Image (spheres, rainbow, N blue to C red):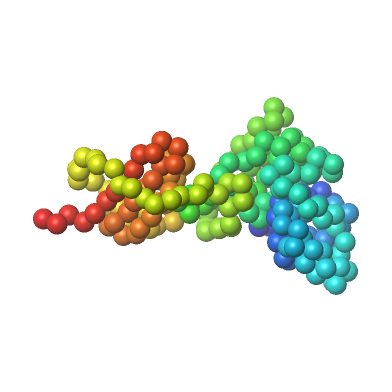
């Protein structure tokens, strides 16, 4: 992650998701702990990470807060690295890094597809970049989890043959592309029998093998 972000000595880094503190510990000697700010939403995780880091002699700035709002106090940062995935890039992240800064963030969703995005922040406050090759997966940030789902009630619909094998959704890329097309849909099942439930619209799509 750090190599892909192009982080260099002297860069000021905002890490979203301290977790165990392992990645934070890697940043401290490389950048100087005074240049490392890490945000963790879970107080118990944050306490364990703080103790683990102190045990190896590191005392970076560790903040217990919602990482989706970042940490404005130390802004602007040169790099923002998220060790959780998000459905979209939170606007505060774009405002807390300098123009030209790099964001490295995993875009995930409710179909469990994900892609690692390397973004450069623009002067106007937006960001542009590309998805990097390879496979990267992190847990979704808690506020980006899908809403609670009760018992599934299947709605009547029209059957028609599909030109695409539903099993493509078992492929990493296939799942991610489908998720981009239907970002509020959940996916259940595998192989020829798949179910997509769109939380936003209530629509459904189901597949089953051809019995002919």
Q: Residue 180: percent from the left, percent from the top?
A: 46, 42
Q: Residue 61: percent from the left, percent from the top?
A: 85, 54
Q: Residue 199: percent from the left, percent from the top?
A: 44, 41
Q: Residue furthest bottom?
A: 55
* Residue at screen point 70% across, 61% down: 19
* Residue at screen point 67% across, 36% down: 91
Q: Quadrant of residue 168?
A: bottom left
Q: Nearer the viewer, residue 209 or 25?
A: 209
Q: Nearer the viewer, residue 109 or 154?
A: 154
Q: Residue furthest top?
A: 124
Location of residue 182 with respect to 26 vertically, above or below: above
**Is residue 87 something that shows in the picture?**
yes
* Residue at screen point 78% across, 53% down: 64
**Is residue 106 something that shows in the picture?**
no
Q: Nearer the viewer, residue 28 or 198?
A: 198
Placement of the C terminus among the 4 image quadrants: bottom left
Q: Quadrant of residue 38?
A: bottom right
For residue 120, side relative to residue 58 (left or right): left
Q: Residue furthest front?
A: 151
Location of residue 197 with respect to 91 vertically, above or below: below
* Residue at screen point 50% across, 49% down: 148
Q: Nearer the viewer, residue 95 or 10?
A: 95
């Amino acid at each position: 992650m750090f190599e892909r972000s192009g982080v260099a000595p002297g860069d000021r880094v905002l890490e979203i998701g301290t977790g165990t503190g392992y990645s934070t510990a890697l940043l401290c000697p490389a950048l100087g702990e005074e240049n490392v700010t890490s945000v963790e939403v879970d107080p118990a995780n944050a306490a364990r990470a703080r103790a683990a880091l102190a045990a190896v002699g590191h005392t970076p700035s560790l903040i217990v807060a919602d990482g989706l709002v970042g940490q404005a106090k130390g802004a602007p940062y040169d790099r923002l690295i998220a060790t959780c995935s998000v459905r979209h890039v939170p606007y505060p992240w774009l405002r807390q890094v300098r123009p030209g800064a790099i964001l490295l963030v995993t875009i995930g969703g409710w179909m469990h597809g994900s892609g690692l995005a390397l973004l450069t922040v623009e002067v106007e406050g937006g960001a542009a970049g590309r998805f990097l090759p390879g496979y990267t997966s992190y847990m979704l940030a808690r506020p980006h989890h899908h809403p609670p789902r009760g018992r599934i009630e299947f709605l009547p619909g029209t059957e028609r043959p599909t030109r695409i094998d539903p099993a493509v959704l078992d492929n990493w890329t296939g799942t991610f592309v489908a998720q981009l097309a239907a970002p509020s849909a959940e996916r259940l099942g595998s192989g020829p029998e798949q179910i997509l439930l769109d939380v936003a619209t209530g629509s459904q799509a189901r597949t089953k093998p051809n019995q002919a």
